[in-house]
Image (cartoon, helix red, strand yellow):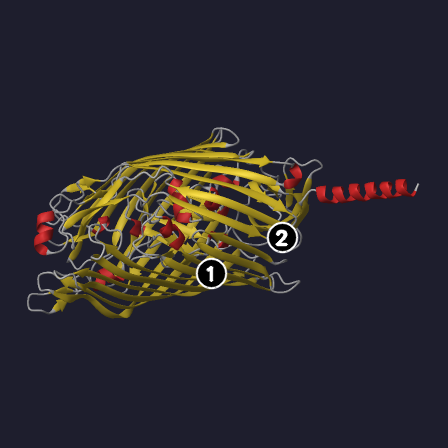
C-alpha cells in the first residue's frame, strides 16, 4: 500500500512538474499612443492582437499608455483604432522571451471625425515616419537590418537592397543614390545632423567599411532617395533619418553578442520605479584579426575599432521631455604590403586613425493640444590622421603623404510644429552650425622631390538653414506638401533658396500616384574651400574659398499598388538636373567634383558644371507573413556630367542598372515547448560595373606618381558585379532568455569582378582592384 501511495505521489508530482515546464512562454507588449501631429497622448485608443480568440488587447489610459500581458512568443499583428483617427496595423512584430516589446505609436487624425476610419490595405510598412515625405521615401526597422542577408546589422548595407541604391563593391558602405556621388548623402540622428557615422572614414566621405552606430540602438527610421521634404537640407542624393529607440522604462534588460569580428553589449532600463525615464547604452569592441588569419580576406593589416552610444530619456511633467544622446567611435589600421617575389621588400606602408564623437541634447515641449516645439543643441568632432610611405631606389621608406584633420561642429536647432486642424499642418525651423577646423596635409611632389603643403588652415565658419513646410489634405485621398528651404554658407556668403512641392493621390483599388519637384543643395567638404595651391614664385593661394554651392533640381513621378493584402508594387520615374557644379577652371579640363567620392583637390574650381541623372525604378515586395517575405528591385538609370569643356560624358556612377532579389523564410522546428525557430535569408544582386579613368602607365612612370588619361574620363568600365549573400540561423526562446546563433556570408560564391585599377609606385605597374571576396560572419547573441 505504501509503495502504491509513493507511486501515486510521484506520478502527481511528475505531471505537475511536466505541466509547469510545458507552460507556454509569454511576454508583455506595451507602449504609448500619441497624435502624430501634436505628440499629445490619445486616451481610450483600442489596441488588439489580430487573430486571437478570445480577443487579446488593451485600451490606452490617461497618459496614452497601454499594456497587454501574457502574449505568446512568436510574430503578431497589432491593430490600433481610435475614434476620429485613421486605423493603423503594425504587422509581424517579433515577440521574444528575452525582451519586452515597447512601442511608440503615432496615429493620424482623419478628416472624417464622426466615425472610425478604416483605410483598406493600409499597413505601417508602406508609410514613413515623417508624414511630410510623400515621394521617394521608405521606412525600415531594426529587425530588417538584422534580417536582410549581407546587411550585417548595418543600415547603409541594408538599404542597398532598395530601388535606386548601389553600394561600393570593394567593401565600403558608401551608397550611390540615383547616380549621385555618395558625398551627397545626409545623416541625421533623432532629428540632428551628424557627421559621417562610419569607422575608417575619409575626408568628405559619407560612408566607410563599418557603421559606428550599432543597430541594437536603433528604432524604426526613414530613408529618402530624392525630392526631399522642405525640412531636409544640405543634401542632394539621399537622407538617412535615423532614430534611436528609447530604453525600457520599467525593467532592466541586457543583450550580449559575440562574433568573429568582435564583442558588443547593450544595457537598458529605468532610472527608478514609478518614473517614466529610461537609459539605453551600447559598447562594441572589434578586431578583424580572426578573419585576417583565415586568409579569406586580405586587409594588408588588422583593422581595429570600437564604439559606444547611449540615450537618456528624461520626462519632466506632462509637457516636457528631455533626452541626451551620444555616439563615439575610434578606428585604426596599420598596413604593409610586401613584394610577392621578394618577401623582404616592402612596397608601401600606411597608418590611419579615424575618430568621431557626438553628443546631443533635445527638448520636446508640448505647448498645447495643437502645438509642440522640438529643440536641440549638439556638438561633434572628427579626427583623421593618416600617413603613407613608399620605398626609394635603395628600398628605404620615405613619407609621400600625411594628413592631420580635426573638425568640430556645434549646432543649435529648433522646429515648431503646429496642427491647425485635420487638414492643415505646419512646420518651421532653423539649424545654426559653427564649423571649426584645424587641418594640415602634405603631399610629395615628384617634380621638386619634397613634401609640399596642400592645406594648412585653422579657423571656423558658420552655416544657417531655415525652412517652412505646409501639409494640406484636400480629402482622405489627396495630400500636398509645399515649402521652402534656405541654406547660407558664411565662409564665402554663398546661399541657396530651395522651393519644393509634392502631391500624393490615393486612387481606388489600393492604387496611389505621387509626384514631387524641388531644388536641393549641399556645401562641399571644408577642405575643398581651403585647399592651397602653390604658385611659380613659391607662394600659396586658396583658389576655391569663394566657390559657390552646387544645386540639383529633382523631379519624381511615382505609382504604387497593393496587388493583394501582402504584395506591393512600386514604380518611380525620376529626373535630376545638377547645376552650379564645381569643375576645374581650365578650358579643356574634364574634371568635375560630381565624380569624387571623398577627399579634396588643389585644382582651381568654378561653378560652371552640370549633370543629368534619370531613370526608372521598380519594386515588388511581399510583406513578411507566415514566416516568408521577398523583395525584388530593378533600377535602370543614366548618370551624365558636363565639365567646363562643354562635352557631356558618362559619370563615375553611370553603372546603368542594379537588380536585387532577396527573401527569407522562418520555420519552427523540433518540439513546440523547445521554442526554436530556424531562419534562412538570401540576397542576389547584379550590378553594372563602376567606371574609372584609365591610367597612363608611361606617363605615371615618368612622373613617379599616378597619371590618368583625363582626355578619356571614365571610359574604362569594371566588370559587372554578381554578389550572392546568405544568412542562416537558429533563434530559441527560453523563459526570460532569447538566444540566436547566425552565420551571415557575403559574396558566398567568392566572385572576383574587376572594380578599379591603381598605380603602384614601387613596382611601376598597374594594380587591379577586385570586389570584396567572401566574408563570413558568425555571431551568437543572448537577450535577457
Of mark 1 and mark 2, the one earlier in the sequence is 2
In this view of the protein, which residue sits in the foreground, 267 or 434? 267
Q: Quadrant of residue 719?
A: top left
Q: Residue furthest right?
A: 1
Q: Residues within 10 Å of mark 2 (few under 14, many from 20)?
A: some
Describe the element under mark 2 as helix, strand or loop. Answer: loop
Q: Which residue is mark 1?
A: 309
Q: Residues within 10 Å of mark 1 (few under 14, many from 20)?
A: many
In this view of the protein, which residue sits in the foreground, 546 or 206? 206
Compared with 204, 713 (above or below) is above
Q: Which residue is mark 2?
A: 64
Give the CA distance from mark 1 to mark 2. Answer: 29 Å
| Residue at the image position 23 percent from the left and 40 percent from the top | 718
Describe the element under mark 1 as helix, strand or loop. Answer: strand
Q: Residue furthest bottom?
A: 458
- Where's residue 151, x and y in %? 42, 45
Q: Quadrant of residue 503?
A: top left
- Where's residue 39, x and y in %? 55, 54
In this view of the protein, which residue sits in the foreground, 559 or 473? 559
Q: The N terminus lies in which quarter of the figure?
A: top right
- Residue 713: image tag: none
Compared with 681, 244 (above or below) is below
- For residue 169, side relative to residue 373 (left or right): left
Q: Quadrant of residue 514?
A: top left
Amino acid at each position: 500500500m505504501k509503495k502504491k501511495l509513493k507511486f501515486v505521489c510521484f506520478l502527481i508530482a511528475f505531471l505537475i512538474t511536466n505541466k509547469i515546464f510545458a507552460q507556454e512562454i509569454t511576454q508583455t507588449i506595451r507602449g504609448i499612443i500619441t497624435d502624430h501631429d501634436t505628440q499629445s497622448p490619445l486616451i481610450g485608443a483600442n489596441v488588439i492582437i489580430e487573430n486571437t480568440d478570445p480577443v487579446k488587447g488593451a485600451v490606452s489610459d490617461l497618459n496614452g499608455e497601454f499594456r497587454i500581458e501574457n502574449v505568446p512568443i512568436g510574430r503578431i499583428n497589432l491593430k490600433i483604432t481610435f475614434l476620429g483617427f485613421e486605423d493603423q496595423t503594425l504587422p509581424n512584430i517579433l515577440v521574444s522571451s528575452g525582451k519586452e516589446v515597447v512601442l511608440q505609436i503615432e496615429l493620424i487624425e482623419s478628416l472624417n471625425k464622426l466615425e472610425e476610419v478604416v483605410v483598406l490595405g493600409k499597413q505601417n510598412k508602406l508609410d514613413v515616419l515623417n508624414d511630410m515625405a510623400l515621394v521617394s521615401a521608405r521606412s525600415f526597422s531594426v529587425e530588417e537590418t538584422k534580417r536582410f542577408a549581407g546587411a550585417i546589422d548595418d543600415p547603409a548595407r541594408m538599404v542597398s537592397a532598395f530601388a535606386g541604391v548601389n553600394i561600393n563593391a570593394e567593401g565600403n558602405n558608401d551608397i550611390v543614390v540615383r547616380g549621385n556621388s555618395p558625398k551627397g548623402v545626409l545623416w541625421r540622428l533623432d532629428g540632428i545632423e551628424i557627421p559621417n557615422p562610419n569607422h575608417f572614414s575619409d575626408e568628405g566621405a559619407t560612408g566607410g567599411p563599418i557603421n559606428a552606430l550599432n543597430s541594437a540602438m536603433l528604432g524604426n527610421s526613414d530613408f529618402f532617395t530624392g525630392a526631399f521634404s522642405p525640412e531636409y537640407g544640405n543634401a542632394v542624393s539621399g537622407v538617412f533619418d535615423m532614430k534611436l529607440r528609447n530604453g525600457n522604462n520599467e525593467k532592466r534588460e541586457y543583450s550580449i553578442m559575440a562574433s568573429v569580428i568582435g564583442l558588443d553589449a547593450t544595457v537598458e532600463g529605468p532610472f527608478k520605479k514609478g518614473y517614466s525615464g529610461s537609459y539605453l547604452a551600447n559598447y562594441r569592441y572589434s578586431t578583424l584579426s580572426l578573419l585576417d588569419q583565415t586568409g579569406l580576406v586580405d586587409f594588408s593589416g588588422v583593422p581595429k575599432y570600437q564604439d559606444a552610444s547611449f540615450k537618456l530619456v528624461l520626462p519632466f511633467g506632462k509637457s516636457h521631455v528631455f533626452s541626451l544622446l551620444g555616439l563615439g567611435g575610434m578606428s585604426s589600421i596599420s598596413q604593409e604590403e610586401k613584394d610577392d617575389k621578394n618577401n623582404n621588400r616592402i612596397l608601401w606602408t600606411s597608418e590611419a586613425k579615424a575618430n568621431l564623437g557626438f553628443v546631443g541634447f533635445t527638448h520636446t515641449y508640448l505647448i498645447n493640444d495643437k502645438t509642440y516645439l522640438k529643440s536641440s543643441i549638439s556638438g561633434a568632432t572628427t579626427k583623421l590622421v593618416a600617413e603613407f610611405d613608399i620605398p626609394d631606389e635603395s628600398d628605404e621608406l620615405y613619407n609621400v603623404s600625411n594628413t592631420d584633420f580635426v573638425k568640430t561642429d556645434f549646432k543649435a536647432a529648433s522646429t515648431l510644429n503646429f496642427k491647425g486642424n485635420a487638414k492643415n499642418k505646419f512646420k518651421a525651423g532653423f539649424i545654426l552650425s559653427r564649423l571649426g577646423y584645424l587641418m594640415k596635409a602634405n603631399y610629395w611632389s615628384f617634380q621638386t622631390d619634397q613634401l609640399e603643403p596642400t592645406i594648412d588652415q585653422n579657423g571656423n565658419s558658420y552655416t544657417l538653414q531655415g525652412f517652412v513646410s505646409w501639409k494640406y489634405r484636400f480629402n482622405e485621398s489627396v495630400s500636398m506638401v509645399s515649402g521652402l528651404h534656405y541654406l547660407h554658407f558664411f565662409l564665402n556668403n554663398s546661399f541657396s533658396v530651395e522651393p519644393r512641392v509634392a502631391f500624393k493621390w490615393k486612387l481606388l483599388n489600393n492604387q496611389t500616384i505621387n509626384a514631387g519637384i524641388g531644388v536641393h543643395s549641399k556645401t562641399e567638404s571644408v577642405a575643398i574651400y581651403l585647399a592651397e595651391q602653390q604658385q611659380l614664385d613659391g607662394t600659396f593661394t586658396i583658389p576655391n574659398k569663394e566657390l559657390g554651392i552646387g544645386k540639383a533640381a529633382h523631379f519624381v513621378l511615382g505609382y504604387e499598388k497593393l496587388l493583394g493584402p501582402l504584395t506591393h508594387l512600386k514604380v518611380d520615374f525620376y529626373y535630376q538636373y545638377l547645376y552650379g557644379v564645381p569643375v576645374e577652371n581650365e578650358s579643356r579640363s574634364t574634371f568635375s567634383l560630381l565624380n569624387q567620392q571623398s577627399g579634396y583637390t588643389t585644382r582651381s574650381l568654378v561653378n560652371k558644371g552640370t549633370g543629368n541623372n534619370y531613370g526608372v525604378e521598380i519594386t515588388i515586395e511581399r510583406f513578411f507573413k507566415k514566416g516568408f517575405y521577398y523583395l525584388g528591385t530593378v533600377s535602370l538609370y543614366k548618370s551624365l556630367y558636363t565639365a567646363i569643356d562643354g562635352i557631356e560624358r558618362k559619370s563615375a556612377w553611370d553603372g546603368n542598372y542594379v537588380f536585387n532579389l532577396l527573401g527569407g523564410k522562418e520555420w519552427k522546428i523540433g518540439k513546440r515547448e523547445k521554442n526554436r525557430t530556424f531562419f534562412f535569408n538570401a540576397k542576389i544582386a547584379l550590378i553594372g560595373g563602376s567606371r574609372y579613368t584609365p591610367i597612363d602607365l608611361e606617363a605615371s612612370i615618368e612622373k613617379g606618381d599616378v597619371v590618368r588619361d583625363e582626355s578619356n574620363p571614365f571610359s574604362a568600365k569594371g566588370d559587372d558585379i554578381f554578389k550572392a549573400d546568405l544568412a542562416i540561423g537558429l533563434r530559441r526562446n527560453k523563459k526570460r532568455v532569447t538566444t540566436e546563433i547566425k552565420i551571415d556570408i557575403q559574396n558566398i560564391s567568392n566572385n572576383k569582378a574587376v572594380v578599379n585599377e591603381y598605380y603602384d609606385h614601387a613596382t611601376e605597374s598597374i594594380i587591379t582592384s577586385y570586389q570584396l571576396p567572401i566574408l563570413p560572419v558568425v555571431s551568437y547573441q543572448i537577450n535577457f
